[in-house]
Amino acid sequence: MPPNTTREPLFAQLSSYHSRQKAARSMAFFQPARAIQRLTGAVFPALLLALCTNPGAAQQIDILDSGGPLSPERAAFDVHFYDIDLSVDPSTRSIEGSAATFAELVSPLRYLVLDLDTVFTITGVKSEPEGTPLRWEREDGRIRIDLGSEKPAGSQVGARVMYRGKPRVAPNAPWDGGFVWARTPSGQPWIATAVQGHGQDLFWPGKDHVSDKPDSVSIRVRVPEPLVVASNGALRGVESHADGTRSYHWFVSTPISAYNVALNIAPYREIRDSFISVSGDTVPVSFFVLPEDEARGREILPEFINHVRFHEKYLGPYPFRADKYGVVQTPHLGMEHQTIIAYGARFDRGAMTGGLDWGFDALHHHELSHEWWGNLVTNADWKDMWLQEGFATYMQALYAGELGGADQYLAYMVSNRGGFANRQPVAPRETRTAQEIYFDSGSDIYGKGAWVLHTLRHMIGDDAFFRALRRMAYPDPALEAITDGGQTRFATTDDFLHIAEEESGKELGWFFEVYLRQPALPVLNAERAGDQIILSWDVPGGLPFPMPVDVEVDGEVHSLSFPAGGAVRIELPGAGDLVLDPDVWVLRANQAPIVLPASR
């Protein structure tokens, strides 16, 4: 998701100093998704129990939020497959159909609890695959389905919910989500969904929690002709009906976060291409554009494919080669919907960068990054959302540097520096909902998260940093050859800490503690007393912070080390002006370069 913020200008002082520089499991009646590295067995139940609160607290439901603590009933099952079958009526702005959930129980369970927005009318619930009617009751945004008896751990269960209604209209997609009902320039319906912050239950019933990905999803959508449905995965077929409608059948063959399932409906033209991945696979490419923009779509698609090649260079193969690399033009700005990136920048390179053109389409680049940071590697709890948004933001800075050199890389980082809220940790240890981490952080998970990576790179050096970046995407090189879902995984901030420590050979717990686990930024103090320079760090809570800082004297740059909690005194008799952190590598509260005039 793009950040919902504007960029502040570059620091005025900077210009003078930087110019030189799931194991395979499936029900018998649907096509299986193969292996997936999932949190199953002893690990997944332990995670779910850790996310649980007492049953009473879990009953407080916020329909327009996603994630957070799981109740024991919702923690008791692991979803394997969703089968979604919907009709969309643009004339009434309504949907009707059903969605089935197929799951394995990780602990005994009688009542299957699913999430669905209260704006919908439920017309029935039945078991799958038997088709037997099931008793159910509804409380706010939860459907409590009676399985008939308590089922033991290891049981396979399935339930289909039939429903209809008018989905919530997104007030400000993609940040305040729901359905977007727009019109193309020719007046045709142009429809999109964007539900990351609120959850998939805004338009289909399922388990609204980021910790549980299905192995695969079947998506059937019926629309009036000549509308086209662009969705996730690979297109299995299109069926025309006598009433002037047609159904599109998309199938996602790899694990996907439920909020990433997306409907995009318009009289699209599909621009097809392909590229050879670094894995050696030929990957199909589909770009769905409005008829009015087909020429512009064909013109920009080679740039989009270059973005993929850039990510493959640093992170390894495009993860979803088995389905497609897909982009779709949308009436909202953008979202990282797996294999069908929502692109609403209107071919404006500065649409998500405050109007600044860095030489590439920043919106597409950001959402594409999420195919690795978010879709391949997924935070198991929203508290670690910076692993998605901060990493994707940082990839844009790397690409700016790829195109324009070190100065442009640094300038891009500085453009992301203004306005940090510092209200909560970038990566709190306590569980968070999507709304809590996204809005309460003031978008710090984007720019501040990217700055943490920027500073870490300087601290451990390029070789160790880029090895850590690739290992975070693919911890084992063998995973780079896998396309059946086994390459995907959940990850935490501590996973990245361990990888960075292993690749650098340095203990980095103090670094992560100061920058990610508490909100305030350290302050670098400096004063000159004659020929002596006194430097020290003010660190929140007195935490250890042996952060080295570059010092420039008479045009030469040296690295100055600090003890864990003390000041540094250096003698510089007769020296010229001294500049601390001249290229602004170290994240701190007083960010601009510090200049100490020469003693006279």
Image: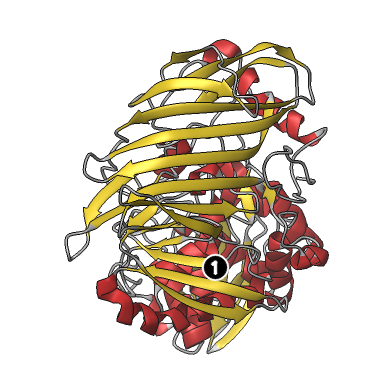
Image x and y of residue 577, in percent: 47, 82
Residue 202 in sight from this viewpoint = yes
Q: Quadrant of residue 215?
A: top right
Sort mark 1 into few (<14), some (14-19) or many (20+) by Cα contacts within 10 Å. Answer: many
- Residue type at mark 1: give it: Tyr
Position of 582 compared to 279: left or right?
left
Residue 176 in sight from this viewpoint = no
Quarter of the figure with the N terminus: bottom left
Position of 416 compared to 582: left or right?
left
Quarter of the figure with the C terminus: bottom left
Give the vertical position of 223 relative to 391 (above or below).
above
Looking at the picture, tell me which residue is in the foreground, 436 or 538: 436
Give the vertical position of 305 relative to 65 (above or below).
below
Image x and y of residue 487, in percent: 73, 57
Image x and y of residue 462, in percent: 68, 76
Looking at the picture, tell me which residue is in the foreground, 540 or 531: 540
Looking at the picture, tell me which residue is in the foreground, 339 or 414: 339
Q: Quadrant of residue 571?
A: bottom right
| Label 1 sits on residue | 325
Give the vertical position of 45 relative to 384 (above or below).
above
Q: Residue at x 28, y 75 (%)?
A: 293
Position of 166 compared to 271: left or right?
left
